[in-house]
Image (cartoon, grey):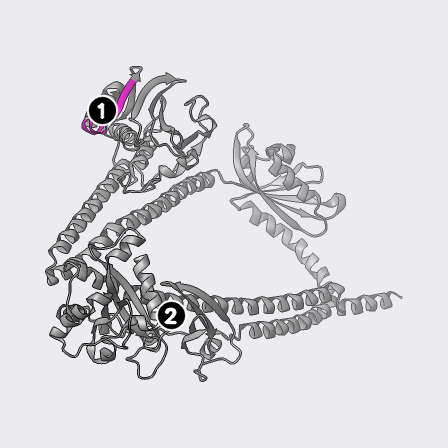
Amino acid sequence: MAGSTGEAKTRGRGSLHWIHWLVLAASLVLTLAAWQFSRSQVLGQANAHFDRQAYRTIELVRERMAKYEEALWAGAAMIRANDDVTDNTRWQAFAKSLRIDARFPGINGIGIIYRVGRDDLDAFLARERAERPDFALHPQQNREDYWPIAYVQPVEINRKAVGLDMSHEANRYAAALEAMDTGMAQISGPVILVQDSAHTPGFVFYAPFYRDGPQPDLQARRENFIGLVYAPFIMGKLMEGTLAQENRDVLVTILDADITLFSEFEQQAMRDPDPMFATERTIEMYGRLWRFQIEASKAFRAQSESEQPTIILMGGILIDTLLLAIFFLMSRSNARLASLTEEIRADLASSESRMRRIVGGLAEGVATIDSQGMIQDCNDAFSKIFGFPDNAAQVFRFDSLVQHDDAFSRLMSSVAKMDGSTYTVAGDLCGIRLDGELFPMELSLSKSGRGNATILIALARDVTARRSAENATRELTERLMASNADLERFAYIASHDMQEPLRKILTFSNMLSEAIETGDKGEVDYSVSVILNSAERARKLVQDILAYSTVQKKQLNPDLIRIEDALADSLAQLHEYIHDSGAGVSTSLEPAEVRADSQQLAMLLENLIGNAVKYRRKDVPAKIVIDGKEVNGAYTLSVNDNGIGFDSALARDIVQPFKRLQSRDEYPGSGIGLAICAAVCDRHGWQMRIASAPGEGSVFTIVMPRAASPKPAHTMSQASAAPLPSGLDPRIGNEDRVVRDEA
């Protein structure tokens, strides 16, 4: 009977348990989920790639058209520079200087169209035939006014267009009238250019010019209209010049209304019969609506296809097969493992004495604890950690050596739930030495045995020194991370603001060079003026950055300073600025001394007062009230103005470097003054409180605690917000904010 029972157990161990089948089913489900997810990821990446290519294709066309527009306006500017008069010789020279073949690929030419009244037609023809005897208008029409192409370059490929009256055809004429009335560049609807022997779709691009330059309204534009600078385009040639250098995996068709201007869909070798993706986007293009139909090509499909989902599916099936084989092998091994258990128990008994010797030499404290919680035995390291004399630990309960907090309760709760074989739980706790001293320790508890025969094995380690080092390292790391993040943000913003004047210098340097070549003195003077102004702005920006950096990095030299003397010096420095602005400044200070760096205190006061003067309302004289008094052990200095104010919700933003709420043209400056004020307060341990409302002025309050101590130099600081005390300024009410660096 006993033998039959043993055989039954062996057979049970040799068969698969239901948990094995559950694992296999879960693995198969995960495999299918991973395959589906990978497939969706591949399609998502392909879709994103298609969207980028479609967007890039459209942007290339837009960028090219914008470049052509620049050429047209350059022609209009040349005519204006010559007092609204030009002739064929001048125009040919100007057009050749543009080097349109190299700089404007895709353009068919550039020329001038004049509006000529019926009464002025004979004089116009006589003037043009004086230089070109064969000049004539075509086709012949009887109209109140004519719109002939007077000049075009290059002449060779556009000879048929010379003298063409643009009013003879509806699309050309409608776009010309629209350009005249709006004063803006316009393109025509689809046309066939007379110079295009292939008779493919094209269009005409216009830019109007007027007597005495651009006109303010419709009537003035019609009365002072002279003509148009125009460029004819053959659509196929334009797209070759625009998209020739692009490695694209998409095909594009462009339509104006229902007329196809350009199409790559006829390229059967590249077109996918069932494209992976397709889109249609309508773009406003200089008065016309162009529809871009874009499809993924065969090359796109080849590039986007991926074997990854299939590999994942096959790999998952292979893993499931291996798991099944492993489970069968594990079940067969159960019987053999049962017989080995008895041998292992015997080995454990013989190993116990050896283990005691090993434990005695450990640096960690090791103790055994009975089911009643009493310490049975411990090594020398355990006694040393808790301050016990030799063999004295056995009279103590183990839980008297650990502070009873939530961590200890959770640890003991986990231990209580343990049963069966040996388990281990660990926790960071607070130990108690024999003399009552608390110290941080790591404690691991292993539970062994069953029922009343269970014991706990405690492994204790004193981590006082390590925790101190970790805390110091963590604090240093956090400061470095915050400093690096602030430095990165500051560098990004500074480089961004610096690019604008540098970009202007570069742009107008090129314009200056061209103006010198053409002898355009007015353009030379204007370009030089812009370059000098941009350079001055860049210099001022660099000075402000250096000032901000100095506040952050310079070692402070704190001294006792009479606040009324510091304010008087700052007002003296700003006297001329305040006087010229017509601002009124009144002060009411309780005499006091504050400990501060005199230079940084002066920067703080001058920036706050200067801002109060600068951001004044146009129609209201500036009134600035500066008062100071002792409040709750701190000296509180307030600068109150009746200027333009701002939304208090933006108080956190305005103390960031280069952050501005108004345009630079209306209120010049680099936007770094309040950032310097916040940095000065941070360095001195002060608070800066800001209260404001649009159109009602602002109150900047500096709270200087007597116990505040200056901070060492560092890299950057960042302001944060907290509530203002009530009653600071009755005009602001509950919209108050405090800006203070808590780093």
- The amino acid beneath tag 2 is Gly
Residue 702 vertical position relative to residue 528 in the rendered view, above or below: above
Image location of residue 213, percent across then percent down: 22, 55
Which residue is at the far right?
A: 1
Pointer 1: residues within 10 angstroms few (<14), some, or many (20+)?
some
The image quarter in which residue 590 lies: top left
Numbered label attached to residue 571:
1
**Do we see residue 392 in this rendering?**
no
Residue 717 vertical position relative to residue 142 in the rendered view, above or below: above
Image location of residue 519, percent across then percent down: 10, 60
State the SS at label 1.
helix
Which of the two discs, 2 and 1, labels the residue nearer the N terminus?
2
Query: Which residue is at 46% across, 84% downward?
Result: 268
Query: Which residue is at 74% across, 48% downward?
Result: 450
Residue highlighted by disc 2: 189
Left or right: residue 381 versus residue 450 is left
Left or right: residue 327 versus residue 72 is right
Task: Find the distance from the CA under tag 2 to the CA under tag 1.
Answer: 66 Å
Query: Which residue is at 24% across, 56% downward?
Result: 224
Of residues 169 and 619, which is closer to you in this image? 169
Q: Which of label 2 and label 1 is nearer to you?
A: 2
The image quarter in which residue 173 lies: bottom left
Image location of residue 72, percent across then percent down: 25, 64
- The amino acid beneath tag 1 is Leu
The span shown in magenta is 576-587
**Do we see residue 101 in this rendering?**
yes
Q: Does the magenta stretch include residue 488?
A: no
State the SS at label 2.
loop
Image location of residue 244, percent across then percent down: 33, 76
